[in-house]
Image (cartoon, rainbow, N blue to C red):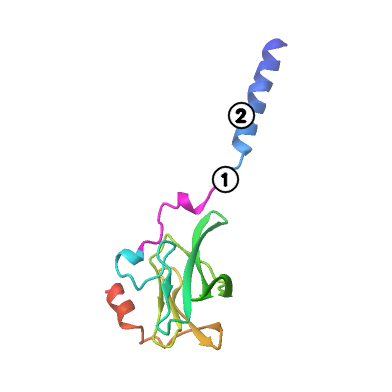
Amino acid sequence: MKIIGIVYGILIIIILVACQSEVTTYNNDPHPNMSHQENSLFATPDNPVESPSGDFLMVIEAGYNDNVYDNHFVIYKSDKEEQPKFISSKKYRTRDRLYFLWDEADNIWVYSGDSGTTLWIKDNDTWSEQNPAPDYKPVVLQEALE
């Protein structure tokens, strides 16, 4: 009986250890977005980028959802970083090639190796998601993809 009790105790410990969920943060990301090392115009969690007009700042926030590391962008007025003007609802996997870039009209271009190119068109102080013309990308983005 004593051996059975020990075996049950060991099984319970094994089950409890196996069921514990590990706390995961973006700092553990095996494929962090480092595209700013290719070109400083690309925004990353380590490289916020000001818009060409100087009115806005794109900050990339790293996250971890459903066992996937991701990035999304948050836009602030350049002079008021504490209150976001816009937060993208779309998240982009970091394990794929990933670029966040302003264009000359303060629109936002996102290239993801998973989902392709997305254009976020600026309308006053908000942005709406669009599919860009398939044959056009900003020169900086075209060069990065070559």
Q: Secondary structure at mark 1?
A: loop
Q: Residue furthest top?
A: 2
67 is higher (above) or lower (below) than 38: above
Q: Residue furthest right?
A: 1
Distance from disc 1 to disc 2, alpha carbons, whole Å, reads 19 Å
Q: Horizontally, is 24 left or right of 102 in the view? A: right
Magenta segment main secondary structure: loop
Q: Residue at x 47, y 74 (%)?
A: 57
Location of residue 119 with respect to 35 vertically, above or below: below
Please state the horizontal and vertical placement of residue 130, each as a whole percent of the image: 51, 84
| Residue 25 position in % (x across, y down) | 52, 51
Closer-to-camera residue (127/40): 40
- Give the residue at mark 2: 14
Neighbour class for label 1 at 10 Å: few (<14), some, many (≥20)? few
Q: Which mark is residue 132?
A: none
The amino acid pointed to by label 1 is: Val
- Of residues 67 and 86, which is closer to you in this image? 86
Residue beneath disc 1: 23
Of discs 1 and 2, which sits in the foreground?
Answer: 1
Q: Examine the rendered structure and indicate whether residue 141 appears above or below residue 67.
A: below
